[in-house]
Image (spheres, grey):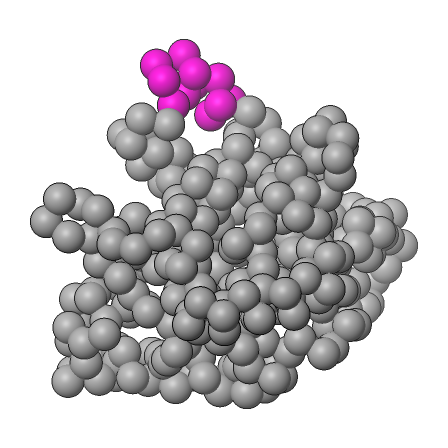
Amino acid sequence: MLLVFIMPLVIVNTGLVSSIWLIFTLYIISGFGMAGIGMGIMHDAIHNSYSRNQKVNKYLGYTLNLIGANASIWKIQHNVLHHTFTNVEEADDDINPPFFLRFTPHTKWYGIHKFQHLYSWLFYGLSTVSWVTVKDFVRMVKFKKMGFFKGGKTFNKELTKVIAWKVISFGFVLVLPIIMAPVAWWIIVLAFISMHFVTGLMITTVFQLAHIVPTTEYPLPNEEGIVEGDWASHQLLTTSNFSPKSRLFSWFIGGLNYQIEHHLLPNICHVHYRKISHIVAETAKEYGLPYHNKHNFVSAVGEHFKMLRQLGKIDNLRAG
């Protein structure tokens, strides 16, 4: 996956490619590699589950920095908030999108949401462009207010690291190709956006299929701010699997089709999810808990589409 991401860009940076269509093709191939890094390398590494060696996990986690995002910020957003407060509005940052997207039945409804099942896919494709340019900085400020960065020096030090990594990433992926490639600069910018569109659409869709579907729940805290029930049951109620029989697909997306196993056992490498899924399913059945699962990717996408449409209806304001 690292080679699929890096090598097409190396070819562009040689300055030997003058065909616009070939440049776009190389960037799109790189987009598949970027998605593979996001789902198959950095995700496990930042969960400390890629290797028993923590230094290996640390350095492979930096592959997220290599593609323009930031491992430290994502660890807070994903490991801490998403995995602790899955599908809890405001606490789980994954279901707190801009106002034109509505991912929970508890979010304020706007008229534009009636069409979100049609236009959401466009914004999924643009999600990583937003992530590497703006969202990391927005989240840093938010997480500072939440107390994750103790003191101004810690925040400034982390901010410096974020900027430095982005300079390296954008330099290799965008600036150097603009300088080296014998085509107009806007061609490279459009190719860069195309690369991110492939990555964003793939990554966002895979993650959304696990939580934004009709069978999952969206619990709210009580007056004391406590979400009722135990943590493990909460993960089963708010998470769904899909396409469990496709080993090739599972390999490509880093085992994220086994989201239930991942949420219950985030410290286990994804290569083991398929084998332990039968144990998890049987245990859930034994205790009368749901084990949500869609047999293939297409049906899971259909369920997500259905949920987006359902959440876009005005009569669904405070349901669920």
Residue 114 visible, this orientation: yes
Nearer-the-camera pick, 78 or 35? 78
Residue at the spot x=26%, y=80% of the render?
312
Q: Residue furthest left?
A: 223
Residue at the spot x=15%, y=73% of the render?
318
Q: Residue furthest front?
A: 286
Relative to 301, 39 lies left or right: right
Q: Quadrant of the C terminus?
A: bottom left
Q: Quadrant of the N terminus?
A: bottom right
Prevailing secondary structure class for the magenta stretch in the rendered image: helix
Give x and y (percent) for residue 65: 62, 38
Residue 168 visible, this orientation: no
The magenta segment is 149-160
Give x and y (percent) for residue 41: 71, 48
Relative to 316, 135 lies left or right: right
Relative to 211, 151 lies left or right: left
Nearer-the-camera pick, 216 or 228? 228
Residue at the spot x=47%, y=25% of the render?
159
Give x and y (percent) for residue 197: 58, 66
